Image (cartoon, coloured by chain):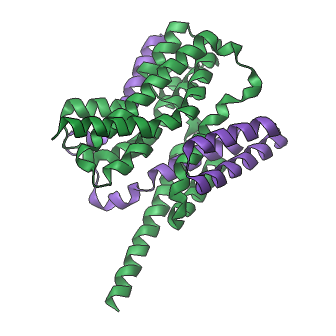
Chain colours: A purple, B green
Amino acid sequence: MIWWVMVCAGLANFLSRFLMFSGIRGIRVPERIEPFLAYVPTAVMSAMIADAMLGSTDAAMDEVIVRCAVGALALITALIFRSVLLTIIVGLLAYQWLL
Amino acid sequence: MSKRLAWLEFGLGVRDQLPLQLGVVPFGVVFGVLGTSAGLSSFETILMSSLVFGGASQIVFVQLWAAGAPPVIVGGSVAIVNARHLLYSAAMAPYLASKRLSWRIVLAYLLTDEAFVVSSKRFQSDHAELAHFHLLGSGLTLWVCWQIATIFGVFAGTTIPEGWHLEFAIPLTFIALIAPLLRNWPHVVVSLVAAGVAVMGQSLPYNSWLILAAALGVCVGGWLSLRQDARRKQERGS
């Protein structure tokens, strides 16, 4: 059974990535929507970051505060140094140290 | 089209994607451990990374499967978590719609969060004509690292101390990716709206908070852009 679920999940995943440029007639992005799409990465990733920082209801308050503090530190590092690598290293080390 | 330029573009995609692997690899290892501890065999866990190839959705899959959720709920939840890719697909459509079907299939398979953010900038630059090679290099790099990390997680993940908190690497990667965009105020507003909706919508069924947060964030951003454009036009006119 798990194989079928995995194949279906994989297919659904692929279709979500393929559908809009699949060439299927009638499925295309309206021109008026295009300016909106520049905000897709910001919106999706901000939502996922917020979930990772504050979403877990079973986390202790101390842990949530540490996550938010480390998130803020990572953001400052990314804004100042513009380095993905440094941001992740600083964030992971700070999280280890504070928790 | 020069083959050398195409390879160069592919190499740039690999180079731009590599730093992000510091966040992706720990996440892949965490998935490998979760998969086997949720009752999946080593082979099933490893194969899921190729079949589904979506970090968050794979985690949701194994968690629901371990909890004994019905297959329809498992598949549906994975589809909902991944529905955000529809937005990526829409954003890439103007650039990829004219490519050959084989290209579109391969690039769609490789279109993850990280590959999209890294390569979409390339499509908006002067190098748009060859940017699909950039996406191929960036997507393939992530795919290879994800598979290796999953295999490592399955066979050696339990030897990693829990105190390392590898799962935290993914939000850090996302912070690093969106930080350059946050120099522009509409993006700051979008970020705050999406984050707020994501936190407040946690109790919504089937992880639908993600789609709701993304949709509202994108709408607010689009509205701010249109307002900015209208104001600029008005200023030019007066």
Query: How many numbered badges does the structure rendering display?
Result: 0
Residue most toward the front?
Answer: B4
Q: Is residue B117 left or right of residue B6?
A: right
Q: Name the spot of residue B24 as percent of width and height, x first.
A: 54, 31
Q: Name the spot of residue A60 as percent of width and height, x first.
A: 82, 38
Q: Name the spot of residue B29 as percent of width and height, x first.
A: 59, 21
Residue most toward the left?
Answer: B1
In the rendered image, the quadrant that contains the C terminus of chain B is bottom left
Closer to the camera, B32 or A85? A85
Q: Name the spot of residue B61 as percent of width and height, x first.
A: 55, 23
Residue B103 in the image: above or below residue A49: above
In the rendered image, the quadrant that contains the N terminus of chain B is top left
Q: Is residue B101 left or right of residue A76?
A: left
Residue B97 in the image: above or below residue B38: below
Quadrant housing residue A35: bottom left
Residue at 32 percent of width and 54 percent of height: B124
